[in-house]
Image (cartoon, rainbow, N blue to C red):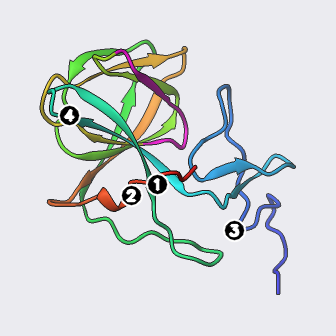
C-alpha cells in the first residue's frame, strides 16, 4: 500500500534532481524521466586510485556488491571517521599521495584527478573515489569550473579489503 505523496511529491524511490550546472550523478543512479533519479539495476561503482608496483598512481574501477530486493545494501564497511571539506573554485594540488585510505564523495562541484601516466578522471556530484595511493608519487587534483566543491572524506578502518569489489572478467 502506497502512502500519500509528500508535499514535494517525492517518495523514497524518488529524489530531487541535482541543481545547477554539470552532469547528472553517475554510479548507481540514472535519469528515469519526470526529473527524478531512481536506483538503477546496474552496480554501484567506485573509482579506486592506488599505487602500482612502479610507484605511480593508477585508476581501477570497482563495483560494490549489493544485496537483492528493492532496498539493496552493501555489507558494512568499517570507518574510523568522517571529514567535511570545502574547496574553493580554481584550487589545484600538485602530485600528492593520499594521507590515508579514504572514500572521497563529491557532493557539489567537479574535480579532475590525474596520474603521472597522463590518465585522469573527472568526479562530480554523487561520484565516489577510493583514495588508496598512500605511497609513491600520488595524484593531482584540479577543481573545474567556477563552482566551489564540497566533499565528504570517509576514512576506512584498518585492514578493509575491497578486492571482492573487482568486477568479474567480461562484465559490463
Which one is nearer the viewer's eye here, 82 or 28? 28
Q: Position of residue 45 (x, y in %)?
A: 49, 50
N-term mark: 2 or 4: 4
Up/down of 132 relative to 113, above or below: below
Q: Position of residue 22 (x, y in %)?
A: 65, 27
What residue do we see at 79% from left, 67% from top? 6
N-term mark: 1 or 4: 4
Crowd band around label 3 with a 10 angstrom C-alpha radius: few (<14), some (14–19), many (20+): few
Q: Quadrant of the N terminus?
A: bottom right
| Callout 2: SS | helix
Circle 4 residue: 52
Circle 3 residue: 12
| Callout 1: SS | strand
Circle 1 residue: 63
Q: Position of residue 148 (x, y in %)?
A: 48, 23
- Report the side of 23 relative to 120 (left or right): right
Circle 2 residue: 165
- Report the side of 49 relative to 148 (left or right): left
Question: How far apart are labels 1 and 2 at the CA level?
Answer: 5 Å
Question: How far apart are labels 2 and 4 at the CA level?
Answer: 18 Å
State which quadrant residue 168 falls in.
Answer: bottom left
Q: Are marks 1 and 2 in contact (CB under 8 Å)?
A: yes
N-term mark: 4 or 3: 3
Q: Identify the magenta region.
A: 118-128
What residue do we see at 50% from left, 68% from top? 66
Amino acid at each position: 500500500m502506497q502512502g500519500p505523496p509528500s508535499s514535494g511529491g517525492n517518495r523514497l524511490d524518488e529524489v530531487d534532481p541535482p541543481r545547477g550546472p554539470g552532469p547528472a550523478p553517475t554510479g548507481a543512479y540514472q535519469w528515469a524521466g519526470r526529473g527524478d533519479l531512481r536506483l538503477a539495476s546496474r552496480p554501484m561503482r567506485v573509482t579506486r586510485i592506488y599505487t602500482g608496483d612502479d610507484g605511480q598512481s593508477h585508476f581501477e574501477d570497482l563495483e560494490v556488491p549489493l544485496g537483492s530486493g528493492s532496498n539493496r545494501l552493501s555489507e558494512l564497511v568499517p570507518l574510523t571517521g568522517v571529514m567535511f571539506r570545502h574547496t574553493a573554485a580554481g584550487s589545484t594540488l600538485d602530485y600528492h599521495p593520499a594521507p590515508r585510505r579514504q572514500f572521497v564523495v563529491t557532493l557539489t562541484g567537479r574535480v579532475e584527478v590525474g596520474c603521472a601516466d597522463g590518465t585522469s578522471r573527472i568526479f562530480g556530484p554523487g561520484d565516489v573515489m577510493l583514495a588508496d595511493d598512500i605511497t609513491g608519487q600520488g595524484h593531482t587534483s584540479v577543481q573545474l569550473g567556477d563552482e566551489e566543491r564540497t566533499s565528504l572524506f570517509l576514512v576506512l578502518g584498518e585492514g578493509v579489503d575491497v578486492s571482492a569489489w573487482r568486477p568479474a572478467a567480461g562484465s559490463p
